[in-house]
Amino acid sequence: MIRVFRPIPAAQLKLLVFDLDGTLVDSAQDLCNSVNAALVAFGLRPLADPSIAGFVGNGAPLLVRRALAAASGATPDQVEKNLFDSAYAFFLRHYREHKLDFTYAYDGVLDALRALRQLHDAPGATARAMAVLTNKPVRPAQGICEGLGLADYFLHIYGGDSFPAKKPDPVGLRSLMEETGARPEETAMIGDSKVDVQTARNAGVWSLGCSFGFGVPTLDQNRPDVLVDRASEWPVALAPA
C-alpha cells in the first residue's frame, strides 16, 4: 500500500538517494552475528538479534557502543574507550569477512531499480541519477552492493565514513546534489527509519519511507512524505504523473 501524506512531484525529480540497510537489503543477521562475535570475544554475553537490530541506523560505531553497553549493563557513555576501540576493530574485521553470509536484497528491489531506470530513460523523461547514502562504512557497503548485483544502478555509493558527519547530518546528501546538479526540490531520499526522514528534512528534500525495514517503529516519530510497504511500489510512487 502507498500512503501519501504530502505528494511528491515525481516528474521533477532528478536524484533518488537510497539508504542501504533496511531499505535495499536485509543485512540484520550478518550485523547481529558480527556484533555478538565481538561481544563474546571480549567476555560479554551475546544479545538477542532483535535487540541488536534495534541499534542499527546510526552507523557502525554507535551500533557497537550500544551493544557493549547493553551486554555489560552500562550506558553507552560509560563504555571504556579501550574496550570500545578493541571491540569495534574486531567487529569490522569480522563483518568484512561475513557481510554476505546471510544478507540479501529485499524482494522486488532489483526489479524496482530496473523499472526506475527505465522510467528516467524513457523519451522525454527527466534524467535521473540514483545513489546510495548509508551510515555503514563505505567499503562493506560497496561490497554488498557489488555482491548482490545492485552497484550498477547507482552513480555513487557513499558510506558513513565518506563525509565528515553521518546521517541525519545532510552533508552527504548535499554533496550528492552538488555532484548531480539537483536542487532540493528535485531530490528524494528513500529509507526505512527516522534517520533517513530527518536527513531529508535537514537537506530540504522529499522523503519516501519504507515500512519493511529495520526502523519501522521510528517512522511514527518522523513521518515521511510518502510511505510504501514494499520495494515494488517505488516505481509507482516515483513515476511522473
Image (cartoon, helix red, strand yellow):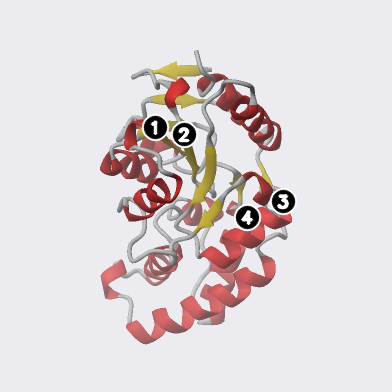
Residue tagged by mark 1? 186
Asked if the residues shown at circle 1 and circle 2 are in contact, with their CB atoms under 8 angstroms apart, the answer is: yes
Rounded to the nearest angstrom, the CA distance separating label 1 from label 2 is: 5 Å
Which of the two discs, 4 and 3, labels the residue nearer the N terminus?
4
Tag 3: residue type?
Leu
Q: Is residue 188 above or below residue 33?
A: above
In front of the other: label 1 or label 4?
1
Q: Position of residue 125 (x, y in %)?
A: 56, 23
Q: Residue at x 40, y 79 (%)?
A: 84
* Crowding at mark 1 (Cα within 10 Å: few <14, some 14-19, many 20+): many
How far apart, in angstroms, are the residues tagged by discs 1 and 4? 35 Å
Q: Secondary structure at mark 2?
A: loop
Name the residue tied to disc 4: 29
Residue located beneath label 3 in the image: 148
**Residue 73 x %, y %:** 35, 69
Q: Specify the amino acid type for callout 2.
A: Lys
Select label 4 or label 3 by which is in front.
3
Q: Earlier in the sequence, mark 1 or mark 2?
A: 2
* Viewer-nearest of discs 1 and 3: 1
As helix, strand or loop, the secondary structure at mark 3 comes to: loop
